[in-house]
Image (cartoon, helix red, strand yellow):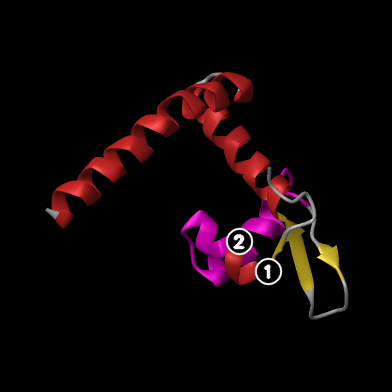
């Protein structure tokens, strides 16, 4: 079970989204639905990992025209297959 208190710095969020830090800074200024950061000081901010993951899921579901719960269910169904395929690949490489 994930830790609900895990926080990500801006660089980590940008990396998770696959974008540069400058693009991320533009995104948080323009995307009103993006989670608000926790501001510890003027130069130290962080985002809850679960809120960032939820935003990513909602964006993906919106673009696919499905409810987030439907997409999450689908991702959970295919996750074990991906892990199993990865294990099979590793076994082949070790042989």
Residue 26 image position (x, y, % from top left): 62, 63
Q: What stretch is highlighted in magenta?
A: 13-35
Q: Is residue 81 left or right of residue 31?
A: left
The image quadrant where one finds the N terminus is top right
Q: In the displayed image of the protein, which residue is found farthest to the front?
A: 95
Q: Which residue is drawn at 86% across and 68% down?
A: 39
Seen from the viewer's position, the closer of residues 87 and 66 is 87
Q: Which quadrant holds residue 85?
A: top left
User: Rounded to the nearest whole Å, what is the CA distance between mark 2 and mark 1?
Assistant: 6 Å
Disc 2 crowd, CA 10 A, few/some/many (<14, 14-19, 20+)? many
Q: Is residue 53 above or below residue 77?
A: below
Q: Is 83 within the magenta?
A: no
Residue 78 image position (x, y, % from top left): 41, 27
Which residue, given by chain and number where applicable, does mark 2 sit on? 13
Residue 53 image position (x, y, % from top left): 63, 45
Residue 25 — which label? none
Q: Is mark 1 on a helix, strand or loop?
A: loop
Q: Which residue is drawn at 68% across and 58% down?
A: 28
Q: Is 32 within the magenta?
A: yes
Q: What element carries label 2?
A: helix
Residue 56 image position (x, y, % from top left): 59, 42
Which residue, given by chain and number where applicable, does mark 1 sit on? 9
Q: Which quadrant holds residue 37?
A: bottom right
Disc 1 crowd, CA 10 A, few/some/many (<14, 14-19, 20+)? some
Secondary structure mostly taken by the magenta-highlighted segment of the chain:
helix
Q: Do the residues labelled 2 and 1 touch (CB within 8 Å)?
A: yes
Q: In this view, does 87 lie to the left or right of 76?
A: left
Q: In this view, does 42 lie above or below 77?
A: below
């Amino acid at each position: 079970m994930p830790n609900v208190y895990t926080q990500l710095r801006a660089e980590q969020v940008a990396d998770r989204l696959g974008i540069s830090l400058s693009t991320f800074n533009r995104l948080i200024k323009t995307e009103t639905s993006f989670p608000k950061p926790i501001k510890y000081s003027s130069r130290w901010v962080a985002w809850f990992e679960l809120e960032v993951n939820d935003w990513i899921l909602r964006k993906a579901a919106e673009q696919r025209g499905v409810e987030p719960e439907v997409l999450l269910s689908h991702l959970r169904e295919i996750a074990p297959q991906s892990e199993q395929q990865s294990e099979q690949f590793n076994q082949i490489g070790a042989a």
